[in-house]
Amino acid sequence: MSGSIFGKHFTISTWGESHGRALGVVIDGCPAGIPLSIQDIQRELDKRKPGAHSIYTSRQEDDSVDILSGVFEGRTTGTPISLIIYNTDERSHDYDDIKHIYRPGHADFSYDQKYGFRDFRGGGRSSGRETVARVAAGAIAKKILSEFGVQITAYTYSIGKICIDMGNFDKDIIYKNAVRMPDNKAAIQAEELIESMRTDGDSIGGVVECTIHNLPAGVGEPVFNKLEAVLSKAIMSIGAARSIEFGTGYTLSTMRGSEANDNYMVTREGMVKKCTNHSGGIGGGISDGSPITFRIAFKPTPSISLPQKTITKDMKNTCIQVKGRHDPCIVPRVVPVVEAMTAITLVDLLFQHVLSNIDLIKKALL
């Protein structure tokens, strides 16, 4: 199976299955000398681990990480960094009944059509559990970005029809509520909605918003590797992601050019500023120094206990009620995954940026 490697200069290669012995990631291209500890990685993993709240899956995983290589005396060595997270609470027998049945909304049918074989235990590589490796790698990418003051903040923007009020925005409470919302009032309503989905045996989707601050202008490659193109590939590779928009997004299609264009101005301090930021901080596929904003819509969790029509492997019609432990809404736990994939993408593009003109190369080498 190809497709498990991401990046060009800063690369990650993830491995492992939902019900296998372990999952992990190998990070290559990380510079030497970056301070890194298990705690740095564990802090990020704890943001997405299961079983932390009643509205999450009841699967109990500590998601404890071990560093196998690439770190010595608390600093990266410049060699490949290998991380491993063991599975400790898998219940593969929950999936015995669907060995020959395709679950609606899952990758079961398409995997079988492609490979003629599938790991039916929780979906194998197509499971959301695969993202634990991404978050582990993202923790290292975040450490690199912190050297440049680049900050990434993702949060739940909406659950179903419950949306945050930006007037109530409080960054400090994002990880103090189960739904990862920066609006306490909306968070209470969203939690109640998700709990009702769990009780009904159903699920609900939502939207995650992400903002990048302090990324310098000039990051991103023209044509095929535009900043928003590479970010889109990274974010849309997350399971259940169904659409992405930057800046004002879809609404731009309803506006006139005179409304949509971001006018420039020079401040008294000689800084270039934009009067608006409809473009979301990107022009021509390259960062312009303004905050970068984007939103991602995630579909409802496909594993629900309500009866659904489907087919068997031998092409017979049947019905299914999915067993096992599943999130009634994956949106809150995908927030740190969005941050991780964003960080990994930015580090890779920042490294490419250094090679974009001779003056930057001289500055780095002379």
Image: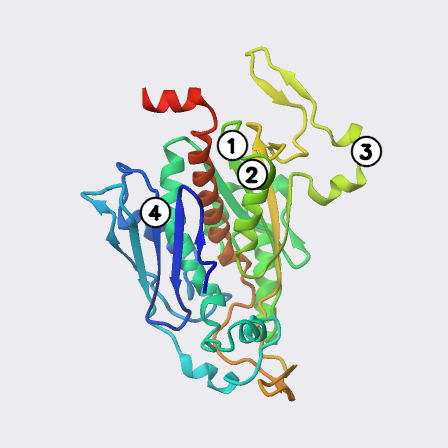
Which residue lies at the image location 52% right of the left edge and 50% below the top edge?
Answer: 234
Callout 4 amino acid: Asp
**What residue sits right under mark 1 in the picture?**
219
Decide: few, some or many residues near mark 4? Use Cα within 10 Å; few <14, some 14-19, many ≥20.
some
Residue 323 image position (x, y, % from top left): 51, 81
Q: Is residue 37 left or right of residue 230?
A: left
Q: Which residue is mark 4?
A: 28
The amino acid type found where label 2 is placed reads: Leu
Q: Percent position (x, y) of residue 297?
A: 63, 54
Q: Give the residue type that dot 3 points to.
A: Arg
Task: Verify CB contact (< 8 Å) between mark 2 and mark 1.
Answer: yes
Separation of marks 4 and 3 at Cα, in angstroms: 45 Å
On screen, 269 above or below 38?
above
Q: Which residue carries the number 2 mark?
A: 227
**Looking at the image, do the residues carrying marks 4 and 3 touch, with CB atoms under 8 Å apart?**
no
Helix, strand or loop at disc 3? loop
Q: Specify the label residue 256 is tagged with.
A: 3
Element carrying mark 2: helix
